[in-house]
Image (cartoon, rainbow, N blue to C red):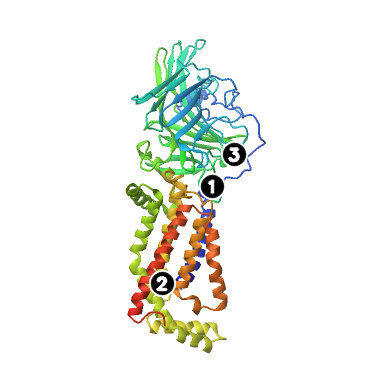
Amino acid sequence: MESRRFALIALLGVVLFFAYQAWEKDYGPQSAGAQQSAGTAATPMEVPAPQAQALAEGASKAGGAATAAAGTEAAVPPAGTALVHVQTDVMDATIALDGASLQRLVLENYAYSKEEPGRKLALLNSTAASNEQPFFVFQTGIAGVEQPLSGDRTPFTAPKSDYRLAAGQQSLDVPLTYVDAERGYTVRIVYHFERGSYVVKLRREIRNAGSSPLQAAPYARWLRNTVQAGVPQKFVHTYFGSGIYQQDGDSYKFKKYDLEDFAKKPLTVEQQAGWAAMLQQYFLAAVVPPPGAKVTYTGRSVGNNRYYLQAVGATTAVAPGATQAFNTTLYIGPKLQGKLDAVAPGLALTEDYGIFTPIAKPLFWVLTVLKQLTGNWGWAIVLLTLAIRGAFFKLSEKQYRSMAKMRKFGPRIKELRERYAGDREQLNRAMMDLYKKEKFNPLSGCWPLLLQFPVFIALYYVLIESVEMRQAPFVLWLQDLSSPDPYYLLPIVYGITMWFQQRLSGQMATMEPAQQKIMNVMPIGLAAFFSLFPSGLVLYYVVSNAFTIIQQYVITRRLDREGLGKH
């Protein structure tokens, strides 16, 4: 009975789960309709000059937001551009002197894949040979009135070409300078890196050495295509796109925007502070303006399957002889639990478990505690499973008592079926009368399984969304709990334990032949289905089934002593 109920509930849950994924727009794969042929050059783009009227109003709605056709400078510096290399303990970055842009950033603590542990993950990368490879860069500058004060092709200089965080050194500054003698100003951009941190502090300064005021508006821009860095997992779709911590009256809300929607409806959001981020599985890149700063966030398509999300600050008049500084914070790295809120309010919302967040967050916390005790995420899942099943032990015992009582009704139910063989409605009514008379609820045995299903779904999201679980090893061949079992052994073990569970319950003998055939095939079908899921999730159900087998044995012996066992 339990096996049959589990099969029905599992199938219902799977249908509902994937229906939810289809309905929930945030959890669907990006379409490839925007992709063009490989090798096409990057579309030119640049932050255009803010219009005089907009500057006078202290806003940049019309001119501060970049458009694909507005500029004449290429988004990516040409080959041969001088580069500055930056090495810290957690990242390896490359800055192009043309435009002072981040062209490449490698995360030293994260491998590209389990199969290539020596190859580190490049979250930012401008060297894509085609649109089938990841392209993702960061650009920054200062917009002016008629033309940019510094832009994506502005030729900066640096004191040296290689910066490395030395032993005992806690931070590293990389200064870049551009002098425009003709127009009489100097732009200085400083990237500030810190030990053990994925936060990069960005300072942009403009010194007006001319005789007239300068109108300056800083901008920071993420530009990327729709190919993620890292090896994508089959049959696993997590959110990929952009997000803004958007002002809503006196509060803020996290809102997601699909990149491909920018081609249909360009995005413009004016507000104070907040942040804008490019999001993908396990990682994000965010720009965080200072608290209280007036900012315009814009999202656009520039063609060639490339999209940008940028933050443009309010226009400031820089008087002759004065220096104006614009500060902002970048976060380029993993979605680390418990770390993101320290970077910016609401940034932890990018650790997205969907509607299962109220269950998934505590679940992850428990797993973290168990991992600290065991030193391994796999053993943490095993202990979590045992704890959950132990908590449901009494409820399961009640379920088995209900099943034992159901067996005693077997002859009477068989008699009713024979009596009302041609009248299904009358049969159902007679059976309900029997249940009511004997004070028996046939659905009571479903509760232990139904109550565990939200845990199942929440654990699924923890495994595919928590970077801490990425490539987490267990034992033997299970070297990545966030990916399916490469040899399908764990799903096979799951099918075997389900088969044993069916036989131990003794319910197969009371089923009709057609039902028996379905139940015989069910372990094979579910094993094949679970072969598509993260192995950590299958591990949860294998341990759960093993616990159930032992539980059935213990409770059945109790029922035998009470005269409620099998006869």
**Left or right of residue 373: residue 469:** right
Q: Nearer the viewer, mark 3 or mark 2?
A: 2
Residue displayed at 43% across by 54% down: 459
Counting residues from the start of the chain, the first of labels 3 and 2 encountered is 3
Where is mark 2, residue-wise?
445
Residue displayed at 55% across by 86% down: 421
Percent x, y for residue 337?
A: 38, 43
Residue displayed at 48% across by 61% down: 494
- Looking at the rendered structure, the kind of residue marked 3 is Ala
Q: Nearer the viewer, mark 1 or mark 3?
A: 1
Where is mark 3, residue-wise?
263
Counting residues from the start of the chain, the first of labels 1 and 3 encountered is 1
Residue reaching furthest to the front = 476
Q: Dot 2: what SS?
A: helix
How far apart are labels 1 and 2 at the CA level?
36 Å
Identify the image quadrant of the C terminus: bottom left
Other residues around mark 1 within 10 Å, as few (<14) / some (14–19) / many (≥20): some
| Frontmost residue, 412 versus 503 | 503
The disc label shown at residue 233, or none: 1
The disc label shown at residue 309, or none: none
Percent x, y for residue 379?
A: 38, 52
Residue displayed at 50% across by 49% down: 483
